[in-house]
Amino acid sequence: MRFHLYYLLGLLSVTSLTQAASNLICYYDSASYLRQGLAKMHTSDLELALQFCTHLVYGYAGLKAGTHELFSLNVDLDMFHYKEITVLHQKFPQLKILLSVGGDHDVDTAHPNKYIELLEANRTDQQNFIDSSMILLRRNGFDGLDLAFQLPRNKPRKVHGSIGTYWKSFKKLFTGDFIVDPLAEQHKSQFTDLVGNLRDAFRSANLMLTLTVLPNVNSTWYFDVPKLHPQFDYINLAAFDFHTPVRNPEEADFSAPIFFQDEQNRLPHLNVDFQVNYWLQNHCPAQKLNLGIASYGRAWKLTKGSGLSGLPIVQETCGPAPGGVQIESAEGLLSWPEICSKLSQNSSAQYRGEWAPLRKVTDLTQKYGNYALRPANENGDYGVWLSFDDPDFAGIKAGYAKFRGLGGIAVFDLSLDDFRGLCTSVKFPIVRSIKYFMG
């Protein structure tokens, strides 16, 4: 692992060594308390991780459509669990505990654009959000609010043959890029105004305000960086899920590469380095940025047409492979302990079939990420291609953040790390690796 840091040191400016990452923002999905069996995460499990974390972000609260009020997504749990979590201040007095609103949990099919509607609301209606937020936070002992707004996502890369690629380039001369939000500039200004009003109210109540930039939310559309960064205590870049089997069902690629791999018509913004550079180049202080790392992987279903090598970009995939048991409703998503249990520990192990393990391919360049695969059998069944960050690669990303002078790392999330030590008997190996390489 020491080689990893020397490699990054050669890539990055020596002047960036003047600042060292110190924040370890730990996201906690409260739904993990309701899972069954070994997937259930108790508060006692959580406490072990908190010796490493500087901040704990409790997810998730929701936004009421129409009234724009902040509210609990699971009242039966949260009415007791909020206090059970915030009382951890007593054991960890330096820990800051925040409540996050939105994420990917506030699913409202009847009002899919309610966060945009909040931005478009008048000042009186927006005050409902501000007031309800302050009441919920102060009543339950939270230190602040994390804004993980569900804003429109950028479009996924489309699969094109060679003729299709040329036609796409020609067509863009006349049509430009596909516009996801025609009022993006208006919404950017409205978001800035809302944040400013929140900041003013929270400052008087001594509450923190933070931002989480969700995967594939285009920062150029919604975030006026020079005006926004002074309003936030810190900003978390969820720099992963650039490619997923749901967004990109027909081809598999690294889900969270550090750097751009300029080949096979990849899009230049789908990597960690681009996202970090955008915020830094727009005058956001590096110490306010925390790099987000996922403690889970994304799995595609391989077909006979996907081939045997597994070298990405992998063609002719067929959407998500079966997910893990921890999050039963999330197709193609596996936690780190679930990934670890599927990796081959025997070089002579069976290569294909329903019970064959996955063969891990380590990224020796330390730029893009690791992957694992099990090719489809003769009938085209049981094929899997998996992109993930293991503890080693999470450490490499922590080294990247440190050498860029970023404020720290944000882990998404604790409940998907190996909190029981099922893989190697070491509990929270991803969190531990990040903390080690942060110094």
Image (cartoon, rainbow, N blue to C red):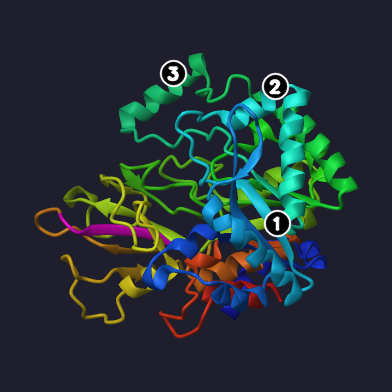
Marks 2 and 3, the one that precedes in the sequence: 3
* Local crowd size for mark 1, using a 10 Å CA cut-off: few (<14), some (14–19), many (≥20): many
Q: Earlier in the sequence, mark 3 or mark 1?
A: 1
Residue drawn at point x = 61 percent, y = 32 percent: 115
- The magenta segment is 381-388
Pinpoint residue 233: horizontal percent, then vertical percent: 80, 52
Q: Amino acid at mark 1?
A: Leu
Q: Which residue occupies the foreground of this view, 206 or 233?
A: 206
Q: Which residue is mark 2?
A: 186
Residue bearing the label numbered 1: 98
User: Tag 2: residue type?
Assistant: Gln
Is residue 385 covered in magenta? yes
In the image, 355: left or right of 292? left
The amino acid beneath tag 3 is Lys
* x and y, in percent, of residue 371 in the image: 39, 63
The C terminus, quarter of image? bottom right
Local SS, label 3: helix
